[in-house]
Structure formats: structure tokens, C-alpha cells
Image (tube, helix red, strand yellow):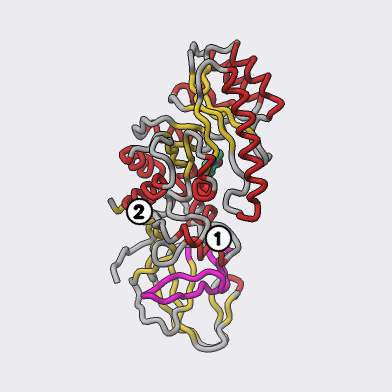
Amino acid sequence: MTKVGETVLEIDLRALEHNYRYLRSKIYRDTKFLGVVKAFAYGSDSVAIAKKLETLGADYLAVAYTAEGVALRKAGISLPIIVFHPQQLSFSSIIEHCLEPCLYSKTIFTTFSKMAKDLGQKNYPVHIKFNTGLNRLGLGENDIDFILQSLNEMPQLKVSSLFSHLAASEDASERDFTMAQIGKFEKISTAILKELNYAPMRHMLNTSGIINYPEAQYNMVRSGIGLYGYGNEPAEDKKLIPVATLKTVISQIHTIGANESVGYNRAYKAKNPKVTATLPLGHADGIGRQYGNGIGHVWIQGKMAPLIGNVCMDMIMIDITGIDCKEGDEVIVFGKELSAEQLASSANTITYELLTGISQRVKRIYLE
Ligand SMILES: *Cc1c(COP(=O)(O)O)cnc(C)c1O
């Protein structure tokens, strides 16, 4: 086995390229592609991922919050960057760094417009978000008149796109609901396009939307999880390659007798003699307490070893009884050999949460 010597998150940029090309193959050639790089590019490294997406020909990037976009600009990323969920106090920073806000409420619409005017902007690119059923962020059908009237009086803004977000694009059982969302968006966006003397883009599909509702791709799609190698269903997972592999190493091996315990609160008690290994990562690295006590498993030398006892802040302990391994050997927590989907679902959570939870303490290394 190779030795990484410490806990690392290996980021495979060739896998990103594969996933990007696969997702692009699902849409028309002239449909634009937005790569979602919020939350450190789903827990990996937003700068490395953004740079690669830029060279691959992605059209747009998106982050959730302004500071994430500022970090990308400071790293030299020049693609247009949408900020999905900006707050008023970051508006001057948005303009200073040429970021493109999503305007999702009347208040945000009006206050951003005022800031753009005060800073002498003309035709500043903005993206208007519509709530079509997720009931999270967005303006509604009732706001169309407000939007059109405001835009008329606001030469400082130019609408780059109208968009919405699906609530259940991965759930086949919610097809009717999703079709209704698409219908609602079609209606709202058409009403606005009719009144403007220019044509903003329209977009509403995330990764599962691309896979399940390609007919609603409009002018652009927005993919996050698919780029990182997960498709929210087994058939798609097979076509994609995980970008992030979390690797660690066996720090120490213990042989314990029957009735001995392992870890805090003596949460694990051995019925029989056991061999255990201690690994240098814990809940501070993003492996939460829910994976302890037999729920999560890691991969060593082709075998699965369960976590035993409580997850500590900086360590986890695993049962390696019967596995041929030694101190210094490499351990895979998730990645190509053992999908993050499998580890996440063992603890009743989703890949999104496991991936984005890997903390900044874990060193990132790159495969080009
Ligand atoms: C996070 C996000 C996406 C990406 O969704 P995936 O399921 O990861 O592809 C797309 N659009 C919006 C508005 C988002 O917030």
C-alpha cells in the first residue's frame, strides 16, 4: 500500500474533467454550464476547482455567499460568478469584486439597486430568482409588476438571468410537482421576457435536474454534486468519478482483551479479544459523531473496518481484527474505493453533508 503519512483529501482534477464532460454530454451544445463551487467546492478546494472549470470552458461559477466569491477573485478567477444568497451588508463588496448577485426578495432587489446607483453603476449584471415551490428564497408571480416597473426606473441594473430552483429533482415520485414548478417558471419568465427589450438567460436545473428533466434546460444548467462525482442515484453514480478521496493512515495498533473498552465514555466494550487501530482524524475534520459505534466503515487493504466507540475530536478507532495491516498503512475513509454516498447513507445523511463537512484542517493534495 502507498503511504500518505497523514490525513489528506486527495482532489482528482482528472475526475472533475470526466464529470464535467459527462454532464455536458447530457445537454445541448449551446446550453451554458454553471459550475457550483460554494462551500469550498463541496468541501474540496474552490480555487483549484474553479481554475480547472475555467480551463475546461465552463461559462459561469456560483457561490452561496459573497466572501466565497471574493476569495475566487483574489485567486485570479475571471469567470462571471453568481452569489446565490447575498446579504445587504456585502453589496459594496459584490460590486467591488465584480460578483453578480441573485436578487431574491423585494428588499434585496431595492437595496442592491440603490447601492449600484450610489456607486455609479450602469447595466450591472444581476440574476432574479423566483420561488416556484421550494419556498426558500425567491420572488413570486405577484412580484412581476414590481420587478418590471423597478427595472424601468433602474438603468443601473441589467438582468443577466431569470432562474428558479427545483425542490425534488432527484425524486421520481415528485415528477408531477417538479413539472408544475417548471410550468410556473415558464409562465413567470415568459411574462417578464415579453416586457424587456433585451433577453436575459433562463435556468432552473441542478445536477439531478440535468439528468431527469433535460427538457427544462433553457439557456444554462447549474451543477454541483455531479461535478464532484455523485449523481444522487446508483445508475448516475456509475457514470461519474468521485473527485475527493479522504485518506488517512494507521497511527497505532492495540490488541485488547475481552471486557476492555475503547475510547471516551467506554462506549465500545470488547466481548472477545480484538485488534484496534487509531486513525488521525475525528469530528473536527468532518467525521461526525453519528459515524461512531459501528455505523461508519473505512477501507483498509480491500476490507471494511467499522468505527468503534465514540468519534473523538481528532481521532477515530476502528476494529481491524482479522485484517492484515500495520501501523503506517493507508486507510480510505471515502472516495473511489468506498463512495462517500455509502458512508453518508450509513448514518442517514447525504453526500452533500459529508463532503462539505470536511474541515479546512485536512490537507488538500491534487492529482492533475
Ligand atoms: C447548490 C445549488 C445548486 C447545485 O445543486 P446540485 O444538486 O449540487 O447540482 C444549483 N442551484 C442552486 C440555486 C443551488 O443553491
Residue 134, horizontal then vertical, whole percent: 66, 42
Is residue 248 found inside the magenta-colored segment of the image?
no
**Mark 2: few, some, or many residues within 10 Å (few <14, many ≥20)?**
many
Query: Can I make out residue 118 in this image?
Result: no
- From what the image shows, is residue 95 above or below residue 338? above
Residue drawn where x is 32% and y is 64% of the image = 5
The number of callouts visible is 2
Figure quadrant of residue 154: top right
- Magenta-highlighted residues: 288-315
Q: Is residue 178 left or right of residue 12?
A: right
Kind of residue at badge 2: Ala
- Quick one: 298 or 51, which is closer to the camera? 51
Q: Find the residue positioned furthest to the right.
A: 142
The residue tagged 2 is 15
Figure quadrant of residue 189: top right
The residue tagged 1 is 288
- SS at badge 2: helix
- From what the image shows, is residue 248 above or below residue 182? below
Q: Is residue 228 left or right of residue 265?
A: left
Residue 255, horizontal then vertical, whole percent: 45, 83
- SS at badge 1: loop
| Residue at mark 2 to residue at mark 1: CA–CA distance | 26 Å
Query: Can I make out residue 223 in this image?
Result: yes
Is residue 301 found inside the magenta-colored segment of the image?
yes
- Quick one: 128 or 346, which is closer to the camera? 128
